[in-house]
Image: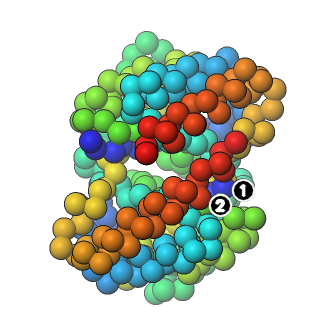
C-alpha cells in the first residue's frame, strides 16, 4: 500500500527559512535508507504559503485568495510518497525521521493513498484503461 | 519549468469516506487527460479520510503517535495533483477549470510551488546534490508500476 507522509508547516517553514546543512544531510541519509529499503517513491518540499494561492469554487464563481494563510500548523511544508505493507510499518519508519522542524516541535501526518480498486464500480473498465494510459504517458513524458 | 502542487482540500464528504461518483471520476479523468496532453501533469493521488490516518508529533526529539480522525476538515487534504508550468498564473488558469462536479461545485484548491535543488543554495553541497539526483532516479524507478 502507498502512503502520503505530510510534513506540517511551522513558523520557520512559513517564514521561508531554508533547512540547515545539517538537517539537509540528515534528511539525505534518511531518504537514502528509504530508497534502499524500496520504500520511497517521491518527496518534495513546498515554498511557504506566502507564495501560494487558494481558489474557492462556488457554483460558477471562482474566488482567488492570495497567501499567506494563517493556520500555520494545518498547512503543508512538504511530503513523502512511500510504499509499505501496512500503516504500522509507515509509522515505524516515520518515527525515525529527522525532525523536519529543525530542533523545534514538528508534526507529520500519515495518509493512505487510494488505489484503482478502491473506486469500485465508479471506475468503469473504460475509465480504468484511460487511467492506465495516462499514467504511462506521464511516465514517458518525464524521461 | 517550475513545479506546483494543487491541493484539493478535504470536506465533510471526503472525510466521511464518500467515494466519487462515476460522473466525477469521468470528469476528473478528462481534466487529467488535458493536463497530460499539455505536458504539465507529473502525478496525483486521492487520500483516504483521516479516520484511517495517524500523526506523529515530535517534541524535544521524542515522537508521539496520534490516531485519526482529525477534526478541522476544511484544513485537511483530500488529494493532490503535481504539475509543471512556466508560472503560477498558468497553474491558476488551469485550476479554475477544475471539474465543477467535484464537491458539488464548492471545491477549494490550494496552489503551492515546489522547491527545486537551486532554492537550497550553498547548504546543499555538491555531494548532497549528487546524492539527491541518485535518490530521485531510484525512487522514480520504484514508483513505476506501483499505480496500477
Give the structural element (helix, strand or loop) at label 1: loop
Picture residue at 49% right of the left edge, 69% below the top = A107
Picture coordinates of residue A142, whole percent (x, y)? 43, 43
Q: Chain of mark 1?
A: A
What residue occupies the far top of the structure in this picture?
Answer: A60
Picture residue at 29% right of the left edge, 56% below the top = B116
Picture coordinates of residue A71, whole percent (x, y)? 39, 54
Picture coordinates of residue B14, whole percent (x, y)? 65, 38
- The residue identified by callout 2 is A83
**Which mark is on residue A133?**
none
Quarter of the image with the C terminus of chain B in it: top right
- The residue identified by callout 1 is A1
Asked if A53 appears above or below A10 in the picture, the reply is: above
Q: Where is residue B17, by image quadrant?
A: top right
The reply to whether the C-beta atoms of the residues labelled 1 and 2 are less than 8 Å apart is yes
Residue in front for this viewpoint, B37 or A109: B37
Q: Chain of mark 2?
A: A
- On whether disc 1 and disc 2 are found on a single subunit, the reply is yes
Picture coordinates of residue A116, whole percent (x, y)? 72, 38
What residue occupies the far right of the structure in this picture?
Answer: A121
Nearer-N-terminus badge (1/2): 1
Quarter of the image with the N terminus of chain B in it: top left
Amino acid at each position: 500500500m502507498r502512503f502520503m507522509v505530510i510534513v506540517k508547516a511551522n513558523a520557520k517553514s512559513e517564514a521561508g527559512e531554508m533547512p540547515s546543512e545539517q538537517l539537509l544531510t540528515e534528511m539525505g541519509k534518511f531518504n537514502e535508507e528509504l530508497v534502499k529499503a524500496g520504500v520511497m517513491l517521491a518527496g518534495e518540499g513546498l515554498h511557504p504559503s506566502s507564495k501560494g494561492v487558494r481558489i474557492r469554487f462556488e457554483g460558477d464563481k471562482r474566488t482567488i485568495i492570495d497567501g499567506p494563510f494563517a493556520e500555520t500548523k494545518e498547512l503543508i511544508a512538504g511530503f513523502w510518497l512511500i510504499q509499505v505493507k501496512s500503516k504500522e510499518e509507515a509509522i515505524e519508519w516515520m518515527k525515525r525521521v529527522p525532525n523536519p522542524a529543525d530542533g523545534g516541535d514538528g508534526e507529520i501526518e500519515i495518509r493512505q493513498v487510494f488505489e484503482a480498486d478502491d473506486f469500485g464500480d465508479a471506475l468503469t473498465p473504460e475509465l480504468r484503461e484511460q487511467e492506465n494510459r495516462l499514467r504511462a504517458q506521464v511516465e514517458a513524458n518525464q524521461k | 519549468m517550475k513545479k506546483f502542487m494543487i491541493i484539493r482540500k478535504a470536506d465533510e464528504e471526503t472525510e466521511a469516506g464518500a467515494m466519487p461518483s462515476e460522473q466525477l471520476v469521468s470528469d476528473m479523468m478528462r481534466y487529467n487527460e488535458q493536463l497530460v496532453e499539455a505536458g504539465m501533469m507529473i502525478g496525483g493521488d486521492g487520500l483516504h479520510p483521516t479516520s484511517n490516518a495517524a500523526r506523529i508529533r515530535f517534541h524535544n526529539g521524542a515522537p508521539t503517535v496520534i490516531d485519526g480522525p482529525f477534526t478541522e476538515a476544511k484544513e485537511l487534504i483530500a488529494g493532490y495533483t503535481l504539475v509543471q508550468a512556466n508560472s503560477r498564473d498558468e497553474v491558476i488558469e488551469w485550476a479554475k477549470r477544475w471539474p465543477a462536479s467535484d464537491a458539488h461545485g464548492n471545491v477549494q484548491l490550494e496552489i503551492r510551488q515546489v522547491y527545486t535543488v537551486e532554492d537550497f543554495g550553498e547548504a546543499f553541497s555538491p555531494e548532497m546534490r549528487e546524492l539527491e539526483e541518485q535518490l530521485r532516479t531510484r525512487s522514480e524507478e520504484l514508483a513505476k508500476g506501483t499505480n496500477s
